[in-house]
Amino acid sequence: MPEAAIITRAEQLRTEIQQHLYRYHVLGAPIITDGEYDALFRELVEIEETYPDLRTPDSPTQRTGSDLSEDLPKVPHPAPILSLSNAFSTEDLQQWETRNLKLLPANIQLDYVLEPKLDGLTIVITYSNGILTTAATRGNGEVGDDVTANIRTIPTVPLRIPATDNGKTAPKQLTVRGEVLFLKTDFERVNQEQAAKGLPAYVNARNTASGSLKQKDSRITASRPLTTYIYDIVAVDGAVPDKEWDILAFLRDMGFHLIPDAAYFNNLSQVMDALSSWEARRHNLPFEIDGVVLKINDVAIRQELGFAGKDPRGATAYKFPSEEATTKLLGVTVNIGRTGKVTPTAQLEPVFVSGVTVSNASLHNYDLIQQMDIRLGDTVIIKRSGEVIPYVVGPVEGARTGEEQPILPPEKCPHCDTALIKPAGAVDLFCPNPRCPERVFRSLEFFVSRGAMDIEGMGPQTIAILIEQKRIQDEADIFYLTAQHFEGLEGFAEKKILNLLDSIQAAKERPLAQLLTSLGIDGVGSTVSGVLADRFRTIDALLELAVQVKQAEAAFLQEAQPLIQTGTSLLEQTPEAQKAQLRLQNPLVELAPRYMDSQDVPKKLERLLKPIWEAAPPTAPTAQTLAAALAHLIDVAKPLMQIEGLGSVLVSSIIAWFADDYQRSLLHKMRQAGVNMQAAESIKAGNALEGLTFVITGTMSVPREQIEALIETHGGKVSGSVSKKTSYVVAGEAAGSKLEKAQSLGIKVISEADLRAMV
Ligand SMILES: [Zn+2]
C-alpha cells in the first residue's frame, strides 16, 4: 500500500490538473505554461503507474482531450485518432524500448523513423478514389469538426491524389493525418498585418491556426497563410508499404506536403546520439516544434505491440525541455541601445527555464506592453529559446489579484534627460541625442566587437575607461589613438598598448560591408550591409544618395505644405483625414513605396487626399504638381527602394543616418584617419564550383546560410530539392529524406569537409 502522502499527492494533482484544464479549455485563460502542465500530468501518470490502485475513473489521465466546437458539423473518423505517450529524457526512451522488447520475440532488432513534432492542429483528411472528400479536426479522437471547405483553401493540401501525373494510383479510400500550422515567418507577417490595422498581436500560433481553421466562412481561412504537413495514414483501402520510411515515400508520391526533415535510424542509440542536434536545429526550422516523434519502422511490429492504456506502444513523442515558465514581474528598467532605441527590460523573480536561471527578460517595447496589457506585479510567461534573449510572452490574466499597476513609458532618457521620440512608422521609443553617454558607450562597444570592426584587445572595459578619461568621444577617435593616450591609465602595459594599436591599424582595412555593419544603423546588420556594399560600392555613393533624397523629400513637403496645414486644422474630424495627413508628412515611408510602380498617381493621390483637398485653400498644389514632386522623390530613392527585403522604414532609416550631420562628420573623421570606405573589386571568391548545383541537408557545423554563401561565392548554385540536375548533396548530421532521395537517384553525397576541400 502506498504511503498516505502519495495518496494525498495524487488527489492534489487530480484536482490541480482539472482546474488547469478548465482554465485552458473553458475560460481560455491558463495560468501555467504547457510545460508546467505537462510536468504535473506526468507526475500523476507516474504515481498511477506505480500504484495502479490509485487510478480513479475520474482521473484526468483517463480521458483524452477534445477540441470540438459546438457550431460545426461533425465527422466520424474511420479509426481513432490517437495521441502518443511522452518521453522527457533518454532514460525514458531506453525504458520505452526495453518495455517493447519484452513484449516481442527474442532477438528482434528495432529500427526507427524520427520526425519533428509539429506544434500545430491535427487534421484528418479523407480521399475517395483520389478526390478529397472530407477534412476534420481531431475533435475527441472519435469524431471531429467538419472543416472540409476550409481545408480546401490551403494550397499545400492536394484536392486530388496523386497530385501530379507520376504513374502512381491512389488507393480506393485513403485517410491521412497531418498538422495545420503557420510557418514562423507567416505568423510574424500575420501579426505585422494586425499591427498595421491597429489590432492586437496574436500571442499563440497554434491557437491562431486553430481559430483560422474553424471559421464558418472559408474566405477568412483562405486569407490566412496556413500550411499543412501530412505524416501518417489513419485508414486505407488498398495496398500501402509495411515500413514507416516507405510509407513516407508513398505519401510523397501521392503529392502530400511532407515534413522535410524526417530521418531514419538503425537503432535507438543512434537516435539518442542525434537528439541534441535536433534540439539545436529546432530554432532553424521554419515551423515551431516541441519535440520529435519516434516510430518503430516496422508497421507489423507496431500493430503487434498494441496499446498501453490509450497510447499505442509502437511510437512515442520525445519532448524537448520546456522553454517557457511563469514568474512574477517585479519591475521594469529602461535600456538605451546604441541606436538610441529604448528597450524596457522586465525584472523578474528568478525562475529556472531551459537550463538557466533567468531574472530579467526583454519586454520588446511599450506599445506591446500596452497591447498585451502587462502590469507591474503580474504573473508573466517568459520564454527562453535558443540564442534569443529571454522575453516576456504575455501576462497570466487569470492570476491577477487586483494589486497590479500599469506600466507607463518614460518621457525622458534616463542617461541624458533628452525627451524621447517615436519616429513615424516605428513602434519603439528612441533617445534622439547622438551624444547621449549611454548611446556612445553602446555604439563604441558594438563598433569594436567581433561581428563589427573586430578590434582585438578593445573590450567594453577598455572602452568605458577611455570614455571616462575623455581619451575618446566617438568611434572615429579610436583611429587617432596613440601610445600617449594610454599614459597614466591603469592596466595598460607597453606590450598591451602596442598590440592594441596594431589591431586598430588592421581595422582600418576592413571591407566596406564590415564598416557598414559596424556603424550600427538601425536594421542594417551584416546581410543588409553586404547588399549595400555590393550595390553602392563606396560610402560616398550612400552619402550622396542621402543628400539627394532629403532634398527631394524637402521639395515634396514644401509643395504639400498648404495641404498639411489644412490637414492639421482637420485632425479632430475624420480618421480618413488623419491617415491622409500622416502619409503627406512622411512621403518616403508612406507614399513612395505605395506609388513606386503605379500608373495614374495624380488620380490616386486625389482619392487619398480628398478629405483634405475639399477643405484646402486655393493655394494648395494640384494633384499633378504633387505627383511630380513624389515622382522625383521616388526616382532618387529608387536605388535603395528597389533592393529586395528593404522595407520603407529601413530605407528611411538608412537615408536619415547618412543625411545626419553628426554621422557625416563621424565618417569624414574616419576617412581622414585612413579607414577604408570602398568595396573591393569583386566579392567573388573563386569559380571552383562553376556550373555545379548543390543541395544541403542535415546539420552543418555553421549556419546553413554560410554554407550557401560559400557555394555561391565560388560560382556554384544551391537548390532546395534533389533532382537529376543536382550535382552533389552536402549531407550533415541527421540528414533526412533528401539524402535518401540522392542515394536512390545515384547522386554523389559529400560531407561539409569535402565541400570545403573543393573550394
Ligand atoms: Zn540619452
Image: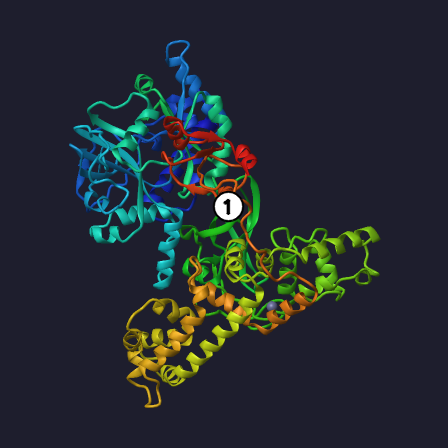
Residue that appears at 41% across and 20% down: 111
Decide: is 587 above or below 694. Answer: below
Q: State the residue in front, 196 or 312.
A: 196
On-image quarter of the N terminus: top left
Decide: is 563 above or below 508. Answer: below
Q: Quadrant of ligand 1?
A: bottom right
Residue 426 seen anywhere in this rendered image of the structure: no
Q: Position of residue 745 (x, y in %)?
A: 37, 28
Q: Position of residue 403 (x, y in %)?
A: 47, 58
Q: Image quadrant of residue 584? A: bottom left
Q: State the residue in front, 229 or 32.
A: 229
Q: Position of residue 46 (x, y in %)?
A: 43, 26
Q: State the residue in front, 338 or 50.
A: 338
Residue that appears at 30% across and 83% down: 613
Q: Callout 1: helix, strand or loop?
A: helix
The number of callouts visible is 1
Residue 498 seen anywhere in this rendered image of the structure: yes
Tell me which amino acid carries mark 1: Ala
Quick one: label 1, few (<14), some, or many (20+) residues within 10 Å? some
Residue topped by disc 1: 709
Q: State the residue in front, 405 or 113.
A: 113
On-image quarter of the C terminus: top right
Residue that appears at 60% across and 69% down: 663
Decide: is 243 above or below 516. Answer: above
